[in-house]
Image (cartoon, rainbow, N blue to C red):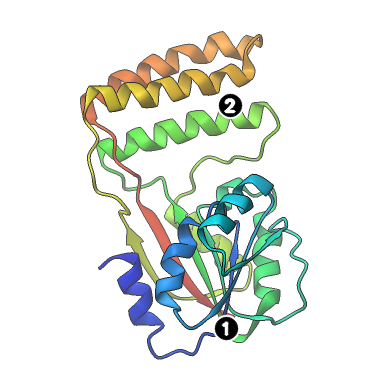
Amino acid sequence: MSTLQQLSVFFSDKKVTSVLDVGTGTGDFLELLLKVFPEAEFTGVDPLESSLEEAASKFPEIRFEKMLAENLDFENHQFDVAAISMALHHLSDIGAALAEMKRLVKPGGWIIINELVSDDLNAAQQVHRMLHHFRSKIDRMVGETHNETFTKSEVVQMAEKAGIKVMFRFEDPKDETLVSDTTEIELKVEKLVQHIEKISGTPEYNALQPQIEEFRKVALKNGFQQATRIVLVGNV
C-alpha cells in the first residue's frame, strides 16, 4: 500500500482535528496529509519565506508561519498531529526539533516522521544516495545544514531518544520509476555541475570534480531511482 493508504488506514479510527506540518517547504507532504485528515485544520511552518509563499499559493486555506523547527512559537499541546517530512537531514538540532513537536502535540497525540534512508537500496537508488551525499557535502562546506542520508535504524533511534513511542512503521519506495534516459541523466549531472560552483575557487573544488564524472558513469550504467523512505508514526 502507498503512504496515503497506510496512514489513512492507521488513522481511520482516530479523531484528528488539528495538524502541524514542520519543515513544510512548498507543501509536498501537506498534499498527502490533507487527504489523510480531510476534516482537520492545518498549520505549516518553515524557515524559508520563498517556500512558504509557494506553499501558500497552492494551499490558500492553510495557515503558514515562518519558524525554525528547533524553536516553534506555539503554546503547549495545540495539535493532535505534528508531522515532519524530508526535513530531518536539514536540521541543525534534530533532538530539539523533535522535542518541540512533542511539546506541541496534545497528550495521546501523534507524531509522523517521513524521511529518506540510505540502507537496503538497489543499484539505481544508490545513485540517488550518491547524488544527495554529494550535494549535502557541498552545502556543508558553505555553512548550510545538510546532513547525509540516515539509516533506518538511525531515524528510529532519533524518535525513541526524543521520547516518541513508535507505534507503526513502514517503508515507502515513493517513486519506483527508473530513470535511464541519457538526456534525463545528463540533466542531473548538469545540476551537480551547477551545485559545485558554490565552492568555486576553493581547493576542494578541483578535488571533488571527479565525483561528478563518477556519478555520470554509475547513473548511465544503473539508472536513477528515488531512494526509499521510512515512515514512523509515534505516540506521545
Q: Amino acid at mark 2?
A: Ile
Residue topped by disc 1: 109
The percent coordinates of residue 214 (x first, y second) are 36, 18
Which residue is found at the position 35% from the left and 69% from the top?
4
Q: In the drawing, what numbered circle is on residue 138?
A: 2
- Looking at the picture, does residue 209 appear above or below residue 189? above
Q: Is residue 80 visible?
A: yes
Give me the C-alpha separation between circle 2 and circle 1: 38 Å
The percent coordinates of residue 121 (x first, y second) are 31, 44
**Quarter where residue 82 is shown:** bottom right
The secondary element bearing badge 1 is classed as: strand
Q: Amino acid at mark 1?
A: Gly
Q: Earlier in the sequence, mark 2 or mark 1?
A: 1
- Looking at the picture, does residue 101 appear above or below residue 65? below
Q: Is residue 136 left or right of residue 213?
A: right
Q: Is residue 119 left or right of residue 225?
A: right
The secondary element bearing badge 2 is classed as: helix
The percent coordinates of residue 118 (x first, y second) are 41, 45
Which residue is found at the position 52% from the left and 30% from the top?
135
Which residue is found at the position 22% from the left and 39% from the top?
178
**Where's the C terminus, which quadrant?**
bottom right
Which residue is found at the position 34% from the left and 61% from the top?
171
